[in-house]
Image (tube, rainbow, N blue to C red):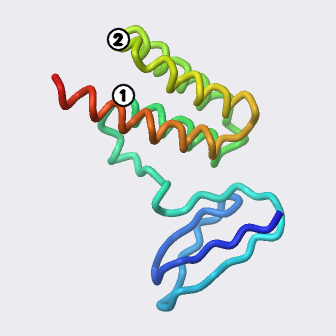
Amino acid sequence: MVLKIGLRPQERVVIAGAVIRNGGKRCELIIENRALILREKDIMREQEVDTPCKRVYFAIQLAYLDPEKRSVHIECYRQQADEILAAAPSMKDYFTRIDEGLAEGDYYQALRNCRELIEYEKEVLSRV
């Protein structure tokens, strides 16, 4: 499976644990094998973690990028998920989809589902 990634000038991407920054011109990378990849737009920095659902995303992101400590990060995710579901049972379907991605070992899909959870959280918080 081949993956093409177009990078804007100065854009970063994490590939197999290495942070790579593009130079001054747009470029295209072609990844020819399976590797852990996370584009800059999908990376959440620790200082951005300001809501419970963003803490969930951050824990999954760490599990994805740090396979050696994956079990620790997944445990953190589970604790956060349990607390959120106790307070907001309406989020159950989102967590079901996230859990399915994790069970399949598809951490990138779990992160995508978590983005939907964060959007729902914004909606819920805007009504409060």
Lower sequence index among marks 2 and 1: 1
| Position of residue 22 in the picture relative to residue 53 (left or right) | right
Establish if 11 lies above or below 64. below
The residue to which callout 1 is attached is 52
Name the residue nearer the viewer: 30 or 63. Answer: 30
Report the disc number at residue 96. none
Establish if 17 lies above or below 47. below
Near mark 2 (Cα within 10 A), the count class, few <14, some 14-19 or many ≥20, is few
Tell me what residue is drawn at x 59 percent, y 85 percent.
27
Percent x, y of residue 93: 51, 21
Percent x, y of residue 83: 42, 14
Percent x, y of residue 85: 43, 13
**For the view shown, which residue lies furthest in the top direction?**
86
| Closer mark to the observer between disc 2 and disc 1 | 2
Establish if 53 lies above or below 28. above
Task: Say whether marks 2 and 1 touch (CB < 8 Å).
Answer: yes
Quadrant location of residue 121?
A: top left
**SS state under label 1:** helix
Tell me what residue is drawn at x 23 percent, y 28 percent.
125
- Name the quadrant of the C terminus: top left
The residue to which callout 2 is attached is 87
User: Label 1 sits on what residue type?
Assistant: Pro
| Position of residue 37 in the picture relative to residue 105 (left or right) | left
| Position of residue 110 in the picture relative to residue 40 (left or right) | right
**For the view shown, which residue lies furthest in the left direction?**
128
Quadrant location of residue 111?
A: top right
User: Label 2 sits on what residue type?
Assistant: Ala
